[in-house]
């Protein structure tokens, strides 16, 4: 009936092709509809049908546009995914116009990442904004939960779907979820013979993501959204989880041809749909082409790597070789001096510490490295890994390299706090914690080792193991953007807090580092505890700055603050045992 009302087919064969049902299968419902007075003649809707249509008109639409669109690198750094253009029209504007074409003007857009870039939609199209402030740490189930009260006869629309023809109708009798006829190895849902959507371990039908929820199903989803959203275990969940009863969805499948509706997730997909889209003119892509002596079209097979805490990185192929490109993340220009980073790479070049960059820009921080096959990072709880990493770190330390800049932990703590621009800390006892940590500075100063080039961010994820020629395992220490002159014992503290070590593990790390040399003196070990407290506050303040930018690190940021508090107390107790009294009084 939806097809007959929207298209006015007069031939059963065409109707069969449009709905996806066999010619025989369409015969029975046509007879039933005619018998109920809903069709006459050559499948023409009657006045009764037209009246019924008015009672089944969609009420509104919710567009989900809060996420990063991380897989769109490198073109998601300056524009959110919903504003990418195809044929000169932003995706989200095309969707809004398609909704307006079928009479739907009550439209809610859930925004988060770069939300300001969607602000004009309110004036131009009369849409209503809903802001998701937790878009960095929670998936789109939370976004839809924020709009749950509006769910009744509603279209749910991901902002990154491009539809060749209008996917919306003036008439929707029942609920559905849109999938493609394209078979996708990564899909976990498939259409069975009854046109039901059932779970599968793959392959399945590619999930387009547009859905329509009529009254009964809308109420079920609304209640599930609210219940699921209260549980943190659903932070990473897609809203589609609310559609399942055991192994199948509570809504029917709406199948479209792959070419008619595309969920645009990658740079390559955008290139295939609109090779002239101005978003393809990426500064990062042009940089790659120039650095590697290639053309922009030679940059292929782009895929996002795990998002780092400071940067975004992506893997790509060019002229038969694979590389990784780093693009600085939000607010990084205030955190990192890229000229100093480039200086460090120059200082360590050819010393066997890590591969030299293929390209590094000391102004904007773009960096290209060769991709290492089969790489793995250090397991901080595997002693053989830790021993290898400490040997690598000590070898670097013994070089006693020098640079023209210093990484001053206590100055950086103040600087990161300054970047909050007057906003208070999330922690009520921040002032006391900061005072306590700073009271350790005299002891640190009195017992500091002579400064030399230190990594500063020598965490387990920056030690890269790979298999070299002859099957030998190679080890690199990468990611030098925070590196500077400092007491090199700071690197042990940094490794510890990122690994989530307790005191027993920290002591073991120190013992491993000093293995084969004189044991670590107690005063120096206590100083490392002091560094753990100071570095904990440093990264806690760093996380608070990033949180103000909308980038949330959850438990990691809380753990850093705990290190500041707990290891101040630990250091104070140890110093009291040595008769030093309160840390602030130490000379």
Image (tube, rainbow, N blue to C red):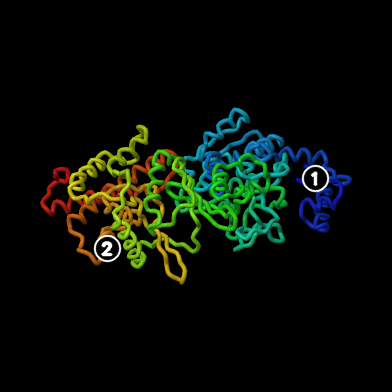
Residue shown at 23%/40% (left/top)? Answer: 435
Front residue of 513/78: it is 513
Comparing labels 2 and 1, the label whose residue is closer to the camera: 2
Residues packed near mark 2 inside 10 Å, few (<14), some (14 to 19) or many (20 plus): some
Nearest the viewer among 398 and 538 is: 398
Residue extending furthest toward the right: 41
- Residue labelled with disc 2: 508
Judged left or right of residue 234, residue 301 is: right
Residue 370 x, y percent position in the rendering: 50, 56
In screen coordinates, is 305 left or right of 199?
left
Q: Label for residue 4?
A: 1
Q: Farthest residue toward the top?
A: 123
As measured in the structure, the alpha-carbon distance from the residue carrying label 2 to the one carrying label 1 is 74 Å
Q: Secondary structure at mark 2?
A: helix
Judged from this view, the residue extending furthest toward the left is 579
**Residue drawn at 75 percent across, 40 percent down:** 52
Spot occupied by residue 200 in the image (x, y as percentages of width and height) = 61, 62
């Amino acid at each position: 009936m939806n097809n007959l009302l929207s298209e006015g087919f007069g031939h059963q064969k065409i109707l069969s092709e449009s709905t996806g049902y066999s010619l025989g299968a369409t015969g029975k419902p046509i007879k039933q509809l005619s018998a109920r007075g809903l069709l006459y003649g050559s499948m023409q809707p009657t006045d009764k049908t037209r009246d019924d249509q008015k009672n089944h008109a969609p009420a509104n639409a919710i567009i989900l546009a809060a996420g990063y669109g991380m897989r769109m690198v490198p073109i998601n750094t300056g524009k959110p995914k919903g504003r990418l253009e195809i044929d000169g029209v932003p995706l989200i504007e095309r969707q809004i116009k398609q909704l307006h074409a079928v009479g739907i003007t009550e439209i809610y857009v859930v925004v988060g990442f770069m939300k300001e870039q969607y602000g004009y939609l309110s004036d131009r199209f009369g849409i209503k904004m809903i802001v998701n402030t937790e878009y960095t740490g929670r998936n789109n189930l939370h976004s839809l939960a924020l709009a749950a009260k509006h769910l009744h006869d509603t279209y749910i629309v991901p902002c990154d779907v491009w539809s060749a023809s209008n996917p919306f109708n003036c008439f929707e009798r029942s609920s559905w979820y849109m999938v493609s006829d394209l078979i996708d190895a990564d899909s976990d849902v498939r259409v069975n013979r009854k046109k039901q959507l059932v779970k599968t371990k793959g392959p399945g039908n590619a999930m387009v993501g547009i859905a329509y929820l009529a009254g009964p199903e809308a109420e079920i989803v609304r209640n599930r959204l609210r219940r699921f959203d209260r549980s943190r275990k659903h932070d990473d969940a897609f809203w589609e989880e609310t559609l399942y009863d055991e192994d199948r969805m509570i809504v029917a499948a709406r199948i479209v041809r792959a070419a008619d509706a595309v969920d645009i997730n990658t740079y390559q997909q955008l290139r295939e749909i609109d090779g002239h889209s101005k978003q393809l003119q990426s500064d990062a892509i042009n940089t790659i082409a120039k650095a590697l002596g290639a053309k922009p079209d030679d940059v292929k097979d782009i895929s996002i790597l795990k998002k780092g805490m400071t940067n975004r990185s992506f893997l790509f192929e060019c002229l038969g070789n694979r590389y990784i490109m780093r693009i600085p993340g939000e607010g990084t220009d205030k955190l990192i001096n890229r000229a100093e980073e480039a200086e460090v790479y120059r200082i360590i070049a050819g010393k066997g510490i890590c591969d030299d960059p293929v390209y590094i820009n000391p102004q904007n921080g773009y960096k290209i490295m060769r991709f290492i096959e089969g790489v793995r990072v250090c397991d901080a709880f595997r002693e053989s890994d830790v021993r290898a990493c400490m040997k690598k770190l000590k070898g670097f330390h013994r070089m006693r390299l020098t640079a023209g800049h210093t990484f001053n932990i206590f100055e950086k703590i103040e600087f990161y706090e300054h970047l909050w621009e007057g906003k208070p800390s999330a922690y009520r006892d921040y002032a006391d914690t900061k005072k306590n940590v700073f009271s350790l500075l005299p002891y640190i100063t009195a017992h500091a080792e002579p400064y030399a080039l230190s990594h500063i961010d020598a965490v387990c994820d920056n030690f890269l193991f790979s298999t070299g020629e002859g099957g030998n395992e190679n080890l690199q220490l990468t990611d030098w953007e925070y590196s500077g002159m400092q007491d090199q014992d700071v690197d042990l503290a940094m490794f510890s807090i990122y690994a989530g070590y307790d005191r027993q593990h920290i002591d073991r790390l120190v013992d491993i580092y000093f293995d084969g040399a004189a044991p670590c003196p107690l005063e120096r070990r206590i100083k490392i505890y002091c560094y753990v407290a100071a570095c904990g506050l440093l990264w806690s303040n760093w996380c608070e700055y990033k949180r103000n930018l909308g980038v949330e690190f959850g438990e990691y940021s809380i753990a850093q603050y705990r290190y500041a508090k707990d290891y101040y107390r630990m250091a104070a107790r140890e110093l009291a045992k040595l008769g030093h009294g309160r840390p602030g009084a130490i000379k």
